[in-house]
Amino acid sequence: MTPVRVGVVGCGAIAQVQHLPNLAALRDAFEVTMVCDRSPALAKAVADAFHVPGYATDYRELLASDVEAVILCHTDPKTEAAVAAFEAGKHVFIEKPMCFSLKEADAILVAAQRSGRVGQVGYMKVHDPAFEAAKTEVDLGEGVRFVQVNHLHPDNSLHLKQFQLLRSNDLPASAAEEARKARRAALLEAVGDAPGHVERAFFTLAGSMIHDLYGLRVMLGQPSGVVSTEVWNEGRAISTVLAYAGGARCIATWVDLPDLWDFKETLEVYGDSRRVIVSYPTGFARGILSTVAVHGTETDGTAFRKDLAVAWESAFVRELRHFHDCIQRGTACRTPVASAREDVALIIDIIKAYQNR
């Protein structure tokens, strides 16, 4: 196995907790040669901590180096860097969300197609052994009648306390304002001039509930429509009802519970006599597996429950292995840019269902 030279843009929590440790563990597959962050102190500190030989404060410097691939996990939106990376001939891994508007998605998609390089979106849950086992069970079942998603989200800081994250206070004053303006422009392009609670709901859908939405798409296909959306608690709570072919419905809910430590995220798929339930840990956890249970009724009326054994491997690690296979072996990408565009479109439709209610 030939290691792929990779650069990481963005040295925040997801890079320090997941990507950089996992890349180091996958040393036969990847060699991290440069990290990049707008904060000079953080870029240097992370490079030192993870034994990376080079660091930069401008992603264009990283793209000018000999890296073959980049992992983009910096502050959203990532559109400009993603397009530039493809144009520089790099393979690109884009941590979710890929972007916020269809205009951005199309720019990234065109750049990816022109480059001929791998463009993978960081949808780790479809690589989760529990999700894969659940999908097999659903596919073998008698059909889907009802789906429920519950995503009860505490403040991430409660879980990040277990890690000694490197931080800095030398971020250029212009960086935050540039990101704010870019996010605002993307919001206007996507759903128009929305009030504060709708804006908050939109970015929650794109930044967090996106995990549930792409999982639903892979499990069930695209919904045939958005039946309704409700936004409450100043945009910190969202419920949407999605319609699927054959009459099935999904009720998906995301609720901010900032002071409750326990993270809960479940996907429940129900047939007439069978249900499959997947439970996920927070993304800021290491060594904690997702679980999958199957409940049902036998033909003789006997009820059963089975808890499926799943592979002892992180979904984050598996998605990086897949990225390597796509680059080195030409494996078809399971989470390409084109499929992420469908998720952007669905998020917009969910918000518009609330705006037009």
Image (cartoon, grey):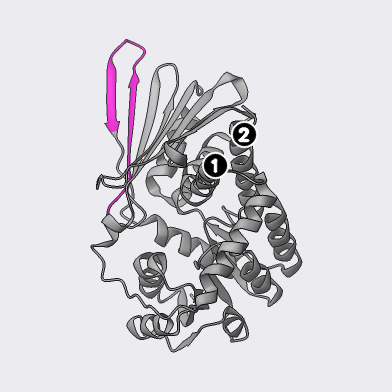
Checking the image for residue 41, the label placed there is none
Q: Quick one: SS at disc 1?
A: helix
Q: Does the magenta stretch include residue 116?
A: no
Image side of residue 340 versus residue 130, left or right: right
Q: How crowded is mark 2: few (under 14 residues within 10 Å), some or many (20 or more)?
A: some
Mark closer to the chain start, 1 or 2: 1
- What residue is shown with label 2? 355
Q: Which residue is drawn at 54% across and 55% down?
A: 97
Residue farthest to the bottom, as pictured? 53
Indicate the position of residue 50 as horizontal and vertical percent values. 35, 80
x then y, percent, for residue 57: 51, 83
- The kind of residue tagged 2 is Gln
User: Residue 345: x percent and y percent?
Assistant: 65, 43
Mark 1 Cα shell of 10 Å, populated few (<14), some (14-19), many (≥20): many
Q: Residue furthest front?
A: 195
Q: Where does the magenta region start and end?
A: 287-306
Residue 231 visible at all: yes
Residue plotted at (69% across, 51% down): 189
- For the C terminus, give its image quadrant: top right
Work out whether residue 343 or residue 289 is closer to the camera in this orientation and state it: 343
Residue found at x 58% / y 60% = 120
Q: Distance between the residues labelled 1 and 2?
A: 8 Å
Q: Do the residues labelled 1 and 2 touch (CB within 8 Å)?
A: yes
Asked which secondary structure carries label 2, the reply is helix
- Point out the residue furthest to the top here: 300
Residue 56 vertical position relative to residue 215 in the rendered view, above or below:
below
Amino acid type of the residue tagged 1 in the rendering: Val
Residue 198 image label: 1
> From this viewpoint, is residue 119 visible?
no
